[in-house]
Image (tube, rainbow, N blue to C red):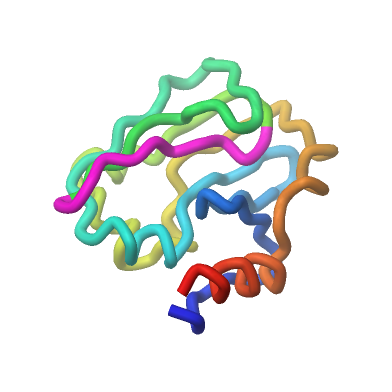
Amino acid sequence: MADTQAKDGYYYTEKHEWVKVEGDVALIGITDFAQNALGDIVFIDLPKPGKQIKAKDSLGTIESVKAAEDLYSPISGEVVETNATLGSNPQAVNAEPFDTWMVKLKNIQTSELGGLLTAAQYKEYVSKLD
């Protein structure tokens, strides 16, 4: 999986979550590497809007045919929206992991982005996992 996809303009964690900042909102999802490792995703449990989240806190659970894994927040903020489409179509994450956000946060702590990986750093990190 050395050619695992990582897009510029996103920040990454070593647990394979991504965050993309759009204005004062952060979108959070999982990487191509994560969805490949999980296999077919069958259910995603996400927090309700209004919940305060700190960086590295659990945002919910992702269940696949292979495993159930926690989703962790790369940065702190308040849940403003969850992707309602995922309730009926969790497989969208498998099809388009970078276009399928799971949670939107507001009141984000942008200072925490410096502790995350860039696309190049994430690709290098993943290449060492092979």
**Of 115 and 84, which appears nearest the observer?**
115
When asked about the image quadrant of residue 107, the answer is top right
Query: At 33% across and 66% down in the image, what residue appears?
Result: 36
Question: How many numbered discs?
Answer: 0
Magenta-drawn segment: 65-75
Query: At 62% across and 40% down in the image, what residue appears?
Result: 74
Whether residue 21 appears in magenta in the rendering, the answer is: no
Q: Position of residue 17 (x, y in %)?
A: 52, 50
**Of 81 and 68, which appears nearest the observer?**
68
Above-or-below relation of 20 to 87: below
When asked about the image quadrant of residue 34, the answer is bottom left
Q: Left of 24 or right of it: where is 50?
A: left
Above-or-below relation of 9 to 113: below
When asked about the image quadrant of residue 78, the answer is top right
Whether residue 66 appears in magenta in the rendering, the answer is: yes
Query: At 48% across and 76% down in the image, what residue appears?
Result: 4
Indicate the quadrant containing the N terminus: top left, top right, bottom left or bottom right.
bottom left
As drawn, the residue found furthest toward the left would be 65
Q: Position of residue 67 (x, y in %)?
A: 23, 46
Query: At 33% across and 61% down in the image, what residue appears?
Result: 37
Q: Position of residue 48 (x, y in %)?
A: 42, 20
Above-or-below relation of 46 to 25: above
